[in-house]
């Protein structure tokens, strides 16, 4: 006879038949099982569902990750000494007006553009040619200076 347990929703869970990418998580409130295929950062779990459906950048800062919603607009990225940047980074390797994220309304696509920065940029480890837009996809990793930015496009 197979053993089973009750989950928080009153349904039965058979621990022997849990899918491979699912694991028990003691630190997350709610159902007994956590789907590891979702790739949602831990700090966003429990957020409003509509927050998880919007395109965003996850920026690695000294104190952890910060989320910046894209909202279908152009976003400037540069050093903190240029305060009019949408994303102002304290990274000494980042130029004042390092790069932009561009949005193409007709296609709904986002592009990364290096503005000819001194130290350059990479997307998924590939150096970017200045002033040539690169189309972004979900989970692309942009590096400007020493700052890592992950693209989230649901």
Image (tube, rainbow, N blue to C red):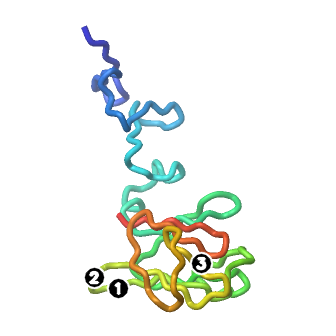
- Is 72 located above or below residue 6 in the figure? below
Residue, disc 3: 87
- Label 2, label 1: how far apart the Cα atoms are: 6 Å
- Is 14 located above or below residue 154 in the figure? above
- Label 3, label 2: how far apart the Cα atoms are: 24 Å
Taking depth in this image into account, of 88 and 7 the one nearest to the observer is 88
Question: Around disc 3, counting alpha carbons within 10 Å, would you say few (fewer than 14), some (14 to 19), or many (20 or more)?
Answer: some
- Taking the view exactly as shown, the residue that stands out farthest to the top is 1
* Residue 131 position within the rendered picture, expressed as x and y whole percent measured from the top left: 50, 92
- Is 25 located above or below residue 139 in the figure? above
Q: Are marks 2 and 1 in contact (CB under 8 Å)?
A: yes
Question: Helix or strand or loop: what does disc 1 sit on?
Answer: strand
- Taking the view exactly as shown, the residue that stands out farthest to the left is 1
At a point 59% along the width and 78% down the height, the residue shown is 87
Q: How many marks?
A: 3
Q: Which mark is residue 107?
A: 2
Mark nearer the viewer, 3 or 2? 2
Taking depth in this image into account, of 40 and 95 the one nearest to the observer is 95
Question: Helix or strand or loop: what does disc 2 sit on?
Answer: loop
* Residue 142 position within the rendered picture, expressed as x and y whole percent measured from the top left: 53, 71
At a point 46% along the width and 48% down the height, the residue shown is 46
At a point 38% along the width and 41% down the height, the residue shown is 35
In this picture, residue 105 sits left or right of residue 112: left
Residue 23: quadrant of the picture: top left
* Residue 146 position within the rendered picture, expressed as x and y whole percent measured from the top left: 67, 70
Question: Around disc 1, counting alpha carbons within 10 Å, would you say few (fewer than 14), some (14 to 19), or many (20 or more)?
Answer: few
Q: Earlier in the sequence, mark 3 or mark 1?
A: 3
Residue, disc 1: 104
Looking at the rendered image, the quarter that the C terminus falls into is bottom left
């Amino acid at each position: 006879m197979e053993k089973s347990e009750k989950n928080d929703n009153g349904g039965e869970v058979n621990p022997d038949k849990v899918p491979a990418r699912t694991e028990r998580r003691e630190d997350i409130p709610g159902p007994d099982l956590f789907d590891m295929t979702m790739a949602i950062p831990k700090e966003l779990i429990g957020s409003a569902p509509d927050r998880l459906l919007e395109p965003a950048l996850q920026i690695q800062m000294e104190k952890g990750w910060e989320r910046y919603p894209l909202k279908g607009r152009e976003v400037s990225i540069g050093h903190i000494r240029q305060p009019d940047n949408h994303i102002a980074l304290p990274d000494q390797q980042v130029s004042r007006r390092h790069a932009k994220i561009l949005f193409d309304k007709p296609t709904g696509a986002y592009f990364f553009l290096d503005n000819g920065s001194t130290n350059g940029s990479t997307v998924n480890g590939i150096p970017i040619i200045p002033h040539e837009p690169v189309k972004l996809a979900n989970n692309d990793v942009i590096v400007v200076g020493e700052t890592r930015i992950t693209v989230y496009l649901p």
